[in-house]
Amino acid sequence: MNDYDRTRQVAQVLLKGEQTPTRQIIQEKVKIAVDSIRTSQPDRVVEVDEEKLVRELESLFNIWMGLGTVLENKEGHIPWLADRNSEINWDFWNRYVRYLEEEKGWAPATTKGLDQLTDSILERLEYPLRSGDWDRRGMVVGQVQSGKTANYTALICKAVDAGYKLIIVLAGIQNSLRSQTQIRLDEGFLGRDSQVNRAFDRGQNSLMGAGKILTEKLLIAHSATSSAEKGDFNQRVANQNGTIPGGADPVLLVVKKNKSVLTNLLKWALNVRGIVNEESGKRIVRRVPLLVIDDEADNASINTNPPLLDENGRVQEEYDVSAINGLIRKLLQSFEKSAYVGYTATPFANIFIYPDPNQKNQEFGDDLFPRSFIINLPAPSNYIGPVQVFGLDTDPAIGFEASEALPIIRPVDDQREWMPDKHKKDHVPGELPGSLKEAIRAFILCCAARIVRGQENEHNSMLVHVARFTAVQSEVAKQVKDELTSLKQRLRSGDGKATGKLEEEFEQLWKDDFVPTTSSILSSIADPQLTPVSWEEIRPLLHHAASKIQVKKINGTAKDVLDYWEHKNGLSVIAIGGDKLSRGLTLEGLSVSYYLRASKMYDTLMQMGRWFGYRPGYIDLCRLYTTDELIEWYEHITVASEELRQEFDYMADAGATPDEFGLKVRTHPQDLVITGANKMKTGTVMRLSYTRTLSETTILHKDENINLKNLEVTEELLRSLGSYTRQEKHNYIWEQVPPEKVINFLLGYQSHDNCRLANTSLLVKYIKAQLPHELISWTVVLISNNRAKNKINIAGNEVGLTLRKDASPESSQEYRLIKSRLLSPTDEWLDLSEETRNEILEITQQRRAEAGKPPSSSNTPDGKILRSKRSPKNGLLLLYSLDPQEINSEIPVIGFVISFPDSKKAQMVEYKVNNVYWQEEFGQP
């Protein structure tokens, strides 16, 4: 350990009692720490950059973490943690906390947050020494790259302290991810290198991570797996090591989700510890409390995905998802006492596990739906996630406030010749596009700037993810290596004008891109480690920074991970890969990403976002090079994910169970968008409820015949209603309209096939299902824009046309509304009284205060609160006449919005999944 790290350790100990220390207090403690180190080593010069250390500690102590929200089903659960907390010796947990604070530099406030969050998970498992049969199923939802591994490492430490004897971690389907997970658990839980010796011994040569923290007693745990390439579970090796589940010491296994591995693991557990159950005649493991941690629980564990195919389209039998799902369920069923906790950042698939009438069959037991609890983990304040990278627009209809995107995205539009969207596995890419050449230069500048900031020994990674096929990836790796080699040579040799020109290119990129970006981010992110860097400081370091960079093809082996671990002074790498980069694998110090791979499935896209995570001291240097199409899809997915979390928090406040949440999400109209054919078979009957939602036509036709027909249907409806009841702000309002009138309008209106949330046949089916008890009285509003240049007469009413921008290309037959929104928020309360409107605004402000947000002067209602205040008997239909000049037409385009009230008794309607749509729209089989 160097002087800087020793000083940091001492300073953190001195600051331990301070929750939010000021800069002055940190400076004082750092000075005392430096003096302490110098006093302890009087025979040599101790050099510490005190200002850098003060900035680092300031940054650490600025981090805060909220509390998680919980949905739970307490049936069959006996609370235990509060009563037994003082009896348990939290040895592994206390050592892990010290490791995080003393070695990893975590602030006490962060470890305190981790303590509270993992207690809330642990207390929802059963007490491991509880008698009888028990089985708990839970899920923890975090953000991509937000520190889920640290959370479940902490949970494992606490579970072992409490008495769980067998811990099985299911770690993805690649050797690289399994090895990475084993290394993290070697460091945080075992405290030694599992490659040296899987069973515990007293030798010091294999100690690592938490194992180097001095404790009063030896903390003994064994591992039946190691971090080596062939370190996955093997029956013979386990028997040779004498590793027995259920002995005096806890046993850890980190395994892939692989048919052979899981089959052998199940056989081993039953052979070593199983006894015959007299009732069933099957072997069962008694008195060995089992904890299964399923990392990336939505990947390969769920029985709704199709078989995984290789790049030649062949089924990879070892990764048969149904088989893996069945084996995990068998494993849990084979233990008298078991707890299953799935960790994921993309819970869509887990929540869409549909109740299986055969799920309680004798062979497999229950499916993996998290019926006991779901916990939504808050991201710490220094997390850079989808909202920070892609931003959010203000959308009161779903309760969103604007969040400005960080200025780090660089659109790519010169890649098509080099890497066509639908290339084959034998594609040979031509010359590197200018955007990728720029990205490589940006990475060199980033590495140099981090050296200036004192981060030379930190890892630096660049991601190039442009092709699925390994042969194409190899070609890309060769091209990138050639480009990097050329840059290194030109920077080193100083070959006359060429070098001068190259330095000018770097200088221009630095001054035109990096300087303004850093300036902008410094004004929006409070990270004291972000300091301005000048070109004069960068220039002499360019060759040094470039010379350290390696190009590496990621192929899913353990070696992908171990390189980081072996480079103690920092590894700088450009990683070229495809699917093996998509999930779970952490690229340390990732700063520049070049990403072209297209997938429109929400969970796949989110998992591919390796650029999310923590970027202390260098977020301003990060860059994401990608296409406009992918940027648009990520903006969509950001909204979908935030809406899912928002719905979770809403239902947690209402005390809902995981089953109720699952039902709510599965029946939400958004399901029509976020679940693809890969989640269910064709013909699967789905159920749908529009309660407390909006249905709006955000994709419309450009076909004048269809638009004329829709205009005629609208006029027919309004004429049948007679004179309007009242006007408000030039809008025409008809009250107490019978539901049959609305149904007839929807039957005649032709919505766009791609506008899934305004499917008129489903809307009609739903409204009819609520009669005669709910949705029996409607308000119909014809929206009129009083500032409109163009006006039209509809059914005898003069209407100012509404302007809505077209976001689709001119060649498209779709009129796609920009930001996917037709509704003006205050239109949604036109049917409500002034008193109700004031109440809605009051609750909206109250919710802001509860979320820690500053008061707002806006009189815009929160749409979800508004819908919860409308009577279940009342529906609202808003009719918008859109100005056809936007699509170079003369026929006004009629769009509609239906606002459905909240209802506890809403009747759901059924529809069948049609895979043809998904094949056409998303390219999914």
Image (cartoon, rainbow, N blue to C red):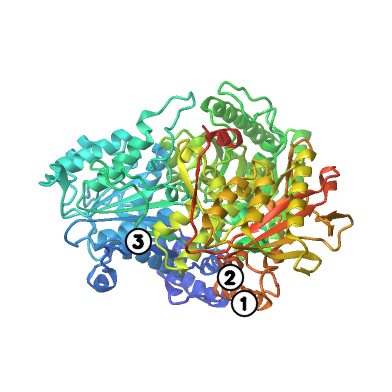
Residue of label 2: 869
Q: Nearer the viewer, mark 1 or mark 3?
A: 1
Residues at circles 1 and 3 in contact by the CB criterion of under 8 Å: no
Circle 1: is it few (<14), some (14-19), or many (20+) Cα within 10 Å? some
Dividing the image into 4 quarters, which one contains the N terminus? bottom left
Left of 739 or right of it: where is 370? left
Query: Within the image, what quadrant is residue 783 found in?
Result: bottom right
Q: Residue furthest right?
A: 789
Residue drawn at the location 38% of the way across and 33% of the way down: 319
Which residue in the protein does label 1 denote? 839
Report which residue position mark 3 lands on.
96
Q: Secondary structure at mark 3?
A: helix
Which SS class for mark 2?
A: helix
What's the amino acid at mark 3?
Tyr
Looking at the image, which is closer to me, 461 or 875?
A: 875
Sequence-wise, which precedes: disc 1 or disc 3?
A: 3
Locate residue 570, reporting x and y percent.
Answer: 50, 47
